[in-house]
Amino acid sequence: MSTVLTDKQRQALEHVERARSSGMRLSDYARARGVGIRAIYDGMAALRKKGVLAPPASGDASAFVAVRVEPTIPSSGVMCRLRIGAVTIECAQWPPVAWVATLALGHADAAP
């Protein structure tokens, strides 16, 4: 592994260390200093390849979760079931949003 750093990699490393020492997120640090975050991230990627920076931890909490959406048609033919008090309304397709909002507000005239 090569430990010779380019000027851009050296600058990226300095920015990362300054952001950490100040307790700031890297994006906040870059914005406050007027530094392009893309250049820092590119430098960090190169530094990780050279082994200068550790790879990001894999167990970090993330706001994103992988999901898979599969369209399904219920065998009963019911796409939507609304329960309002003791009344249950079953729809074969998604009802108009305005109609559902009218029901939720409790208006007597909720004809579609």
Image (cartoon, grey):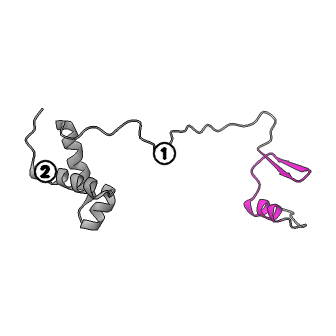
93 or 16: nearer the viewer: 16
- Report the magenta residues as a range: 80-105
| Marks 1 & 2, CB-CB < 8 Å contact | no
The C terminus lies in quadrant: bottom right
Foreground mark, 1 or 2, reads 2
Q: Position of residue 39 (x, y in %)?
A: 22, 55
| Nearer-N-terminus badge (1/2) | 2
Q: Position of residue 4 (x, y in %)?
A: 7, 41
In the rendered image, the residue lying farthest to the left is: 4
64 or 59: nearer the viewer: 59
48 or 84: nearer the viewer: 48
Residue drawn at (10%, 45%) of the image: 5
The N terminus lies in quadrant: top left
| Amino acid type at mark 1 | Phe
Residue drawn at (30%, 56%) of the image: 26
* Label 2 SS: helix
Q: Which mark is residue 101?
A: none
Q: Position of residue 99 (x, y in %)?
A: 79, 62
Q: Position of residue 44 (x, y in %)?
A: 23, 46
| Amino acid type at mark 2 | Arg
Q: Is 100 one of the magenta-colored residues?
A: yes
Q: CA distance from mark 1 to mark 2?
A: 31 Å
Where 4 falls versus 21 (above or below)? above
Quarter of the figure with residue 25: bottom left
Q: Which residue is mark 1?
A: 64
- On the rendered structure, is 60 left or right of 97? left
Residue drawn at (83%, 61%) of the image: 103
Q: Which residue is mark 2?
A: 10
Q: Is 3 one of the magenta-colored residues?
A: no
Residue drawn at (51%, 39%) of the image: 66
- On the rendered structure, is 89 left or right of 47? right
